[in-house]
Amino acid sequence: MTKLIKMGQNAKAASRILATLTTEEKNNALNLIADEIEAQADFVLTQNEKDIADGRRAGLSQAVLDRLLLTDKRIKALADDTRSVANLDDPVGSVIDAKVLPNALRLSKRRIPIGVLGVIYEARPNVTIDIAALSLKTGNAAILRGGKETLRSNLALVKVIQAALEKASLPLSSVQIIDDPDRALVRELLRLDQYVDMIIPRGGAGLHRLCIEESTIPVITGGMGICHIYVDESANLEQAIDIVENAKVQRPSVCNALDTLLVHPAVADEFLPQVAARLAESKVELRAAPKAFSILKNGVDVHPAGAEDFDQEWLSLVLGVKVVGGLEDAIAHIHEHSTEHSDAILTNDLENANRFVNEINSSAVYVNASTRFTDGGQFGLGAEVAVSTQKLHARGPMGLEELTTYKWIVLGDGHVRK
């Protein structure tokens, strides 16, 4: 028996216990985790510093290092987010629908945990806490496999989680982590269908492709964003500059940050130099298509766009810029290049706003707002386990309800089928 099979068996056994817990018992465990995060902050930060040092020696980009980094502020946010999940309504046991058939059978659909989640993610050790909190709140066990760049940080966080689980008298195998960075173990996890009920990858296109092609377990894809903002001719340009800056600069290393700016030709000459000047204050590099480049060529850090620049999730202070023919051209560009994560229109034309919303089928579509809001916390879901860009089961930020399924409850009174 391999170590991973044993982890699967233990997770399945733990999931059966978690599925029977009351909301109060689950919330107690979450609050204990939050307390333990704060109590062991120095230990976690020390382990994270070692990961950061290794990352610098390995030549990781500043964007990746930012995703990897934990700080006192981020540690506090992890504890606060965990308590926030405890305060959310528990979906498990709720009735989705109910009806009485003509033969007097009473039917209802009741939410239940999915079972065991296998979550594979890169960098961002905060994901370890997010997954644990959401899994426990919904009665799911979790097997985690983080990136090698954050191995020490993730091991420390799982140690913190398990210390809290022990205080709550819950199985330590409710949350487990694969502590070996060997990629062969990812493939083994993807075939652990006897014990794992869902795979959730959080990372780049390569990881998603690997999971889709090799998993014998249902896979939820998402978390990779090529996000667009289209500035229409009727947009409030002063407001648009603020929105574009926020979407690009506020945290450029995350999946809902802006990757491509599309601009209507009627406002391009006025708008592009202004937004470029604002972005230059944050040292944003612009990759401009020909029309945009002709307007911006004398600006700071502006370069002609390459052939593949509009198919990039930058995760850094780089932004693609293009002047499009109008709304129809913008929609066509998004259809060609979007990963269906988060796309926005800035406009004061209601007809154009409605058309954009109707024709863009991304998991989150915005009117006059930054794409940075595509987040479980911002959407009022608490922490999120992923942002799904697929169309089955779950879409957008996956919070508590998205980590449940349902079963039919059938109540009869001596009924037999004739």
Image (tube, helix red, strand yellow):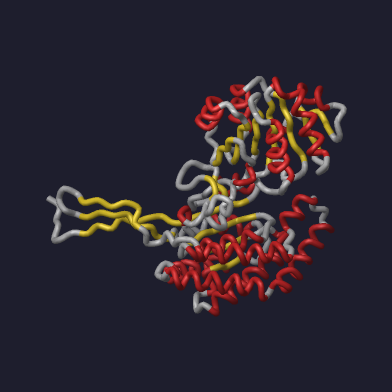
- Does the image show residue 195? no
> Residue placed farthest to the left in the image?
418
Q: Residue at x 86, y 31 (%)?
A: 299
Q: Position of residue 277 (x, y in %)?
A: 82, 35
Closest to the observer, 189 or 389: 389
Q: Residue at x 51, y 49 (%)?
A: 219
Q: Position of residue 176 (x, y in %)?
A: 57, 68
Residue 14 versus residue 101 in the image, above or below: below
Left or right: residue 410 versus residue 194 is left
Q: Residue at x 16, y 48 (%)?
A: 102
Closest to the observer, 301 or 304: 301
Q: Position of residue 3 (x, y in %)?
A: 57, 68
Q: Position of residue 301 (x, y in %)?
A: 85, 35
| Number of disc labels | 0
Residue 379 versus residue 140 in the image, above or below: above
Closest to the observer, 87 or 238: 238
- Does the image show residue 119? yes
Asked which quadrant contains residue 318, the reply is top right
Residue 59 versus residue 342 in the image, above or below: below
